[in-house]
Image: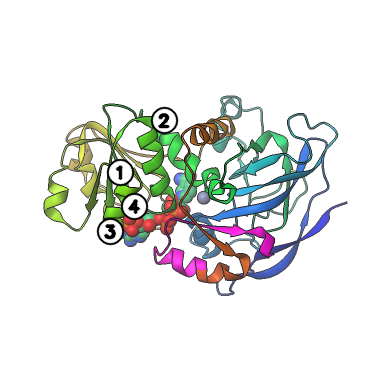
Amino acid sequence: MSTTVKAYGTESPEIPLHELTISRRELQAHDIEMEILYCGICHSDLHQVHADFGPYPAPIVPGHEILGRITAVGDHVKNFKIGDLAGIGCIVDSCDHCEYCNDGIEQFCEEGVTFSFNSEDKVSGGHTFGGFSKSYVCNERYVLKMPAFENLAAAAPLLCAGITVYSPLKHWGAGPGKKVGILGIGGLGHMAIKIAKAMGAEVIVFTTSPDKVSDAKRLGADEAVLSSDQDAMAAYVNKLHFIIDTVSAKHDVNVYLNLLRHDGTVVLVGLPPQPLEIGAFNVVMGRKSFAGSNIGGIAETQEMLDFCFEHNIVADSEIINIQDINTAFDRLERGDVKYRFVIDMASL
Ligand code: NAP
Ligand code: ZN
């Protein structure tokens, strides 16, 4: 028997988010059911609600930084019991037998990964609904064990923002002796500062917002540069080993390719809906790379959670009630959040 639960979502980009009811699938043998306590708000939620990546099946219920408590377990569930704290991020299903799934990079599953919202649900049919809701049902293989963070609400954003920057920082070797640039101080960017510093890298932040320059240092950055300040930018030409670009809108990446040392890489994690242009000389000179990175696998997400718990890293969060979601989306659009909204799901 599927269960009916309260959620927040919308039918089209023109209609503000509002309360609605959705069905969660019947608990399968390997499924857990989770009561959702907190859900972070990522810019990807906003992109999708705005149909930036194309039209969606209605209704859409966003939310993929989902933290809660287990309320039921299927007959074959091994790793969770009722009452456990748990997390669900972006991935809720994959084929579990391709090369990528076997290598723990389920985000690149050959048969197509199922995302926590707005994805085909290959178990029950229909499409998945995200964490702006009272509960979630999914296979335990994709559920994270949540360490006992003192501030649980502030730990929810680790489930997308945290892993999305941890994975490339690790892949491109952030650590002692490495100068890492971080472009954009939003939800992802501020997590990247904290995680890169904990890995031992030297961190230089580039922002378009004058008020974030001093705040970046409070967050742990060694240097923060206002990207409109040409002289300050010139000081970093050919200096950085790699740069994580978290910017959500179209921008000129060539400026940042010029800040790389030879063999350096700009790693795009932001998802501007429009194509970005690269000048040939900006990569040819210095054998530079322009790369991308997509969230991270389940095992790596667990590793990131444990790393952040050990290093006392959570998001700087502003807690809101679900009824304020449309105002929060407007503010996120304007970059007016320091640095992640988190919904207290008790308000639904
Ligand atoms: P966010 O909180 O809105 O942060 C984005 C930051 O980018 C802003 O705070 C701003 O920083 C900067 N920015 C925004 N517009 C800009 C513009 N026109 N020019 C230059 N800088 C601009 O968003 P988020 O939640 O961190 O997400 C960032 C992006 O990553 C989104 O596109 C999101 O969809 C994507 N994302 C990708 C993945 C993945 O797996 N690849 C996962 C999650 C999210 P300053 O004020 O400091 O300039
Ligand atoms: Zn996200």
Instruction: Looking at this view, name the residue that lies furthest to the front.
Output: 150
Element at badge 1?
A: loop
Residue for badge 2:
170
Residue 143's disc is: none
Q: Position of residue 279 (x, y in %)?
A: 22, 47
Confirm or deny contact between disc 3 and disc 4 (CB under 8 A). yes
Query: Tag 2: residue type?
Result: Lys
Counting other residues with Cα less than 10 Å from the Cα at mark 3, is it few (<14), some (14-19), or many (20 or more)?
Answer: some
Which image quadrant for residue 85? Answer: top right
Q: Position of residue 92 (x, y in %)?
A: 65, 42
Q: Is mark 3 within 8 Å of ligand 1?
A: yes
Q: Is mark 2 within 8 Å of ligand 1?
A: no
Residue for badge 3:
208
Confirm or deny contact between disc 3 and disc 1 (CB under 8 A). no
First in residue order: circle 2 vs circle 3: 2
Identify which residue is drawn at 62% across, 59% down.
Answer: 344
- Front residue of 100/316: it is 316
Residue 221's disc is: 1
Residue stretch rendered in magenta on the structure: 328-348
- Front residue of 191/95: it is 191
Counting other residues with Cα less than 10 Å from the Cα at mark 1, is it few (<14), some (14-19), or many (20 or more)?
Answer: many
Element at badge 4?
A: loop
